[in-house]
Image (spheres, grey):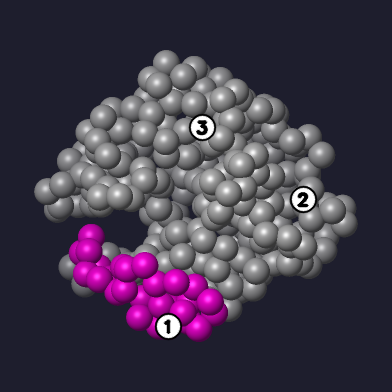
Amino acid sequence: MRRSPRRGRSLLAVLGLLAGTTAVPAEPARYWPPITDPPTEVRAPGRFVWVELLTLDVGTAAEFYGKVFNWTFQTFGPKDDFKTYTLVLSGDTPIGGMVYARPKEAEKFPSSRWVGFISVTDVAAAAALVEKEGGKVLVTPSKVGDRGTEGLFLDPEGGMFGVIDSATGDPDDFLAADGQWLWAELWAGDAAKMAAFYKGIGPYEVHDGATSGEASGFQLWSGGYARAGILPRPAKVPTTWLPYIRVKSVADTVARAGGAGGKIVMPPTHMHGTSIAVILDPTGAPFAVAEWAAVAREAAK
């Protein structure tokens, strides 16, 4: 069943999974659409192939992202908002989803979070590595509807991420278009230690520099491509994955985001060889936007 996104009836705190001490099974009542439809023959282990917003309020989030990025949405499920799944589309391309999360300790986790899912061939092996290295399994490896097998974890520093073995294959492996997910970056307390940890998840090759030409941080490579970066986090900022959306103009995007109720955490700044900004959506989820001129530079050679 498809419906339009609606505002939640009450303010929820997300990330309540973090408060638990034991793993919890995936919720069977929710419909989880496949990440590729029709199926593909693509497999790209180590690539972030899906992103989901665990949110306080799907309706408010959808309204914001629709205004800022012109995303559209399809909501599946019953009338109970807590059991729906909202598919996010950029143009005709599905790029992620939005779900309500039930908190255990609402006062401790009052904001939302985008969570990236890494393509893997063995979800159970990833879960075993997480536990061995001092992380935490939040959602045990489970078959999730027609989607495939997923797991949701905390790395040893508390950064949340997921893994997926998609039943229908991964999305085509191409550079993101404007309005789509471009990059993922972990802000870590010990960047070298986290690079070593994630090397076993991908599996990845670890290169120096969070992006090409930078002296600090690391890159995670698989299949001949840089998939993500790891940087030392700023003081007082918890370890977290920050997803990047590609845009034509960071300045214009920041203006739209501010007008739509977002909070500008970092204004347009030259970093990673381009212009980026960091924004909180109205439900508290952080994300970054970046221009990407590399294609133009390559074409000019």
Disc 2 to disc 3: CB gap under 8 Å? no
Q: Visible in this render: residue 49? A: no
In this view, the residue in front, 33 or 112, is 112
In which quarter of the view is residue 129 placed? top left
Secondary structure, mark 3, is strand
* Residue picked out by circle 1: 255
In this view, the residue in front, 245 or 226, is 245
Task: Name the side, left or right, on which 119 lies relative to 6.
Answer: left
In which quarter of the view is residue 56 placed? bottom right
Specify the amino acid type for callout 1. Answer: Ala
Tell me, yes or no, whether the highlighted magenta stretch contains residue 250: yes
In the image, what residue occupies the spot 30% across and 74% down? 268
* Residue picked out by circle 3: 153
Specify the amino acid type for callout 2. Answer: Phe
Secondary structure, mark 2, is helix
Give how far across and how far down residue 121 sits, in percent.
52, 27
Give how far across and how far down residue 126 sits, in percent.
49, 24
Disc 1 to disc 3: CB gap under 8 Å? no
Q: CA distance from mark 1 to mark 2?
A: 32 Å
Q: Visible in this render: residue 158? A: yes
In the image, what residue occupies the spot 44% across and 72% down? 263
Instruction: Give the residues in magenta.
Output: 249-276
In the image, what residue occupies the spot 32% across and 68% down? 266
Q: Is residue 6 above or below residue 213?
A: below
Give how far across and how far down residue 16 sits, in percent.
60, 41
Q: Could you classify mark 1 by the number of other residues whose Cα lies within 10 Å: few (under 14), some (14-19), or many (20 or more)? A: few
In this view, the residue in front, 11 or 54, is 11
From the image, which quarter does the N terminus lie in?
bottom right
* Residue picked out by circle 2: 82
